[in-house]
Amino acid sequence: MNKMEWKWAEIDPILFESILIPIIQRHDRYFICVRLVNNFILNNYENELSEEAKSFGCLVGSLCTKQEVDLLNEINKTYLNGLSDEEFTENDIMCDFDEFIHFYHIFKKTVKLRQDFRVPVITEP
């Protein structure tokens, strides 16, 4: 098995200053696990998408490869043991990190934070 390249990424250092999420390299681009984005970032916002966010289109996702699953589980166990209570599987979805960041900037400007918003606490890497 080839060693996969990955690194930590900050999605929003202002609102989520303590949240680092692993991103994994596929060819010449980085991808992020949709479950992690939902759990740590998007679930802190209201469920109503703005018209601007809807007009963005959709983020293209693809299923995790076996290597990505193994790596995400290793990261979860080795570094944090807090990314997810459940193991990652080949049913988890990855999306392009740069495309997600573009979407998130629109999303953040146009969708309200939940009233019960709080920064999730996870152990630093």
Image (cartoon, grey):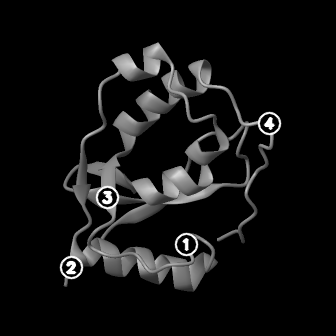
* Pair 2/3: label in front: 3
Find residue 88 and report its horizontal and vertical position in percent: 40, 75
Q: Earlier in the sequence, mark 2 or mark 3?
A: 2
Secondary structure at badge 3 equals strand
Say which residue label 1 marks. Answer: 84
Say which residue label 3 marks. Answer: 93
Q: How many other residues sit within 10 Å of disc 3, few (<14), some (14-19) or many (≥20)?
A: some
* Pair 3/4: label in front: 4
- Mark 1–mark 2 Cα distance, whole angstroms, equals 24 Å
* Pair 4/2: label in front: 4
In the displayed structure, would residue 46 be above or below residue 63?
above
- Mark 3–mark 4 Cα distance, whole angstroms, equals 28 Å
In the displayed structure, would residue 4 be above or below residue 11?
below
Q: In which image quadrant can residue 79 be found?
A: bottom right
In the displayed structure, would residue 13 be above or below residue 25?
above
Say which residue label 4 marks. Answer: 115
Say which residue label 2 marks. Answer: 2
Find residue 86 and report its horizontal and vertical position in percent: 50, 79
Q: Earlier in the sequence, mark 1 or mark 3?
A: 1
